[in-house]
Image (cartoon, helix red, strand yellow):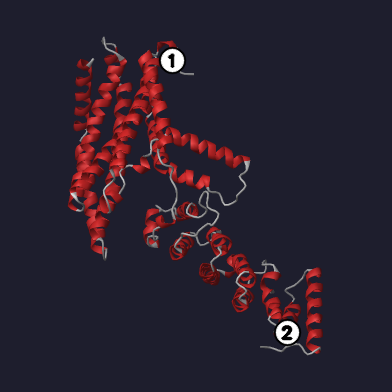
Amino acid sequence: MRDERPLSHVSGPVLALLAAGLALQIGLHAAAPQARAKGADLLPPPATTLLRLASLGEPIALAKILMLRLQAFDYQSGSKVPYKNLDYARVEAWLSRILELDPEGQYPLLAASRLYAEVPDEARQRSMLDFVYRAFLQDPNRRWPWLAHATFLAKHRLKDMDLALKYAAALHTYITATDVPAWASTMEIFIREDLNELETARVMIGGLLASGRITDRAELNFLDGRLREIEERLKQGGPRKR
Amino acid sequence: MLHPILPIARYTLLEALRNRLLWLALILVAAGLAFTQFLQQVAITESNEMQAALLAALVRVGSVFMLASFVVTSMVREFNDKVMELILSRPMRRSSYFFGKLAGYAALALALALISSLPLAMFAPAPQVALWGLSLACELLIITAFALFCVLSLTQVISALAAVAGFYLLSRSISALQIMAANPLSDALSLGQHVVNFVIDAIAFLLPGLDRMTQTGWLIYSAPSPSEIIGVLAQTAVYLLLLCGAALFDLQRKNF
């Protein structure tokens, strides 16, 4: 404990000054307009080299801060239609920069696939899904969850089966890690099935079962069941390969 | 009351001059000019704006750092050399000592603001530079008073400088923190988020809006509106009042 005089030693004018200063500061702050992030305020990002210079050797920390800053432009208080004023080209540019600063970070791709790609605007959805696709190609084994979600969006939201197939095929083709769940690389099979590309789906399931990559008994049974179902449909004269 | 304040202010300013602080400020400006000149050569367009923006940001942070460091180290030296006790042993009020020191440092802050602003007139319209410089002077006055308050309370170089740095960074980013805290991704706020938001809002009430002061945009885009300048002046006056009250409160309770 510091050696201090009692409060009674503080003169009245000083106490009054302190109280007045505090009251005025609180009043001034309350009267000042509250800060609001506006879509129009989102400026284009600087070059990656400049950001690296500005990070002072801490690119990952800077990436995290930039991501939070970008997020502040997202979900604006009182607005139930988020992102409607955002310039998506700039959002994408910021997300790219953040990924370049922190390539192992998943936050930008989560934001792209689960936030920015879920706006009720097809053009914006497509641009974000394309960004996720391009980012996936750079590091498939780490970024597959976001392309898997993009495949889901393309299929169910955009109802664009060709786009969904493109993403699912990329998942099937480029994922090489063994710790990735099989459902991610088998999405292509089910989309082809939905597209009535039964022959291709049959070949893919057969190949997958033969490859030994599927080890889970329940999954094996499920895929085996689907294979038999497809073969049955083919026997009944279902459509062939497109 | 003015009688002891003016000599204390004068000697404080003299100490700054003998520490070659103003020379250091000139060196900072010269280095900033050289650096931004180099970057200007690289720029394809908006080279003047780029030079103005970078130089402004550099001298702004540099001035704050120099001023805070000087206030803290000079006051700690006075504690250690018992100069403060010697002065306070004279028949004078503690508030006179405080206001004398504050006046000396404030004069230095104004000189630093002037030195920092003048070169910007080469790249931006003079009226805009003048308003930017006025705002910088206000910002430096707040930093001066806060550094003085911290060093009187903490009496240690490291802790006082850390407090000033924290205060400055927080004051410049508190609005962004408030926006982030107020706009979470999920609609349902947990109790923890409510508590965090409350704490951030409470801190914001006690901090000056430094993010609304000395904006680079005032130099390269449009001049601040009269309401913005009035806001800056009001914020400076109110915060100086608060800091003077807090520092005097602490000084009057201090036992030597």
For label 1, the crowd category at 10 Å Cα-Cα, with few meaning under 14, some 14 to 19 and many 20 or more, is some
Chain bearing tag 1 is: A
Residue at mark 2 to residue at mark 1: CA–CA distance: 86 Å
Is residue B47 among the parts visible in the rendering?
yes
Q: Circle 2 sits in a helix, a strand or a loop, which is it? A: helix
The answer to whether A212 appears left or right of B223 in the picture is: right
The answer to whether B204 appears left or right of B70 in the picture is: right
Q: Quadrant of the N terminus of chain B?
A: top left
Residue at 21 percent of width and 43 percent of height: B130
Q: Nearer the viewer, residue B67 or B199?
A: B199
Chain bearing tag 2 is: A
Identify residue type, mark 2.
Answer: Leu
Say if mark 2 contacts mark 1, CB within 8 Å. Answer: no
Q: Circle 1 sits in a helix, a strand or a loop, which is it? A: loop
Identify residue type, mark 1.
Answer: Glu
Q: Nearer the viewer, residue A95 or B65?
A: A95
Residue B153: give x, y in percent of width and height. Answer: 40, 24
Residue B15: give x, y in percent of width and height. Answer: 21, 28
Is residue B24 among the parts visible in the rendering?
no
Please tell me in which quadrant of the rendered image residue A177 appears.
bottom right
The answer to whether A21 is drawn above or below residue A210 in the figure is above
Please tell me in which quadrant of the rendered image residue A81 appears.
bottom right
Both on one chain, marks 2 and 1? Answer: yes
State the residue position of label 2.
A198
Residue at 39 percent of width and 61 percent of height: A44
State the residue position of label 1.
A4
Q: Quadrant of the C terminus of chain B?
A: top left
The answer to whether A156 appears left or right of A234 in the picture is: left
Residue at 78 percent of width and 87 percent of height: A234
For label 2, the crowd category at 10 Å Cα-Cα, with few meaning under 14, some 14 to 19 and many 20 or more, is many
The answer to whether A119 is drawn above or below residue B26 in the figure is below
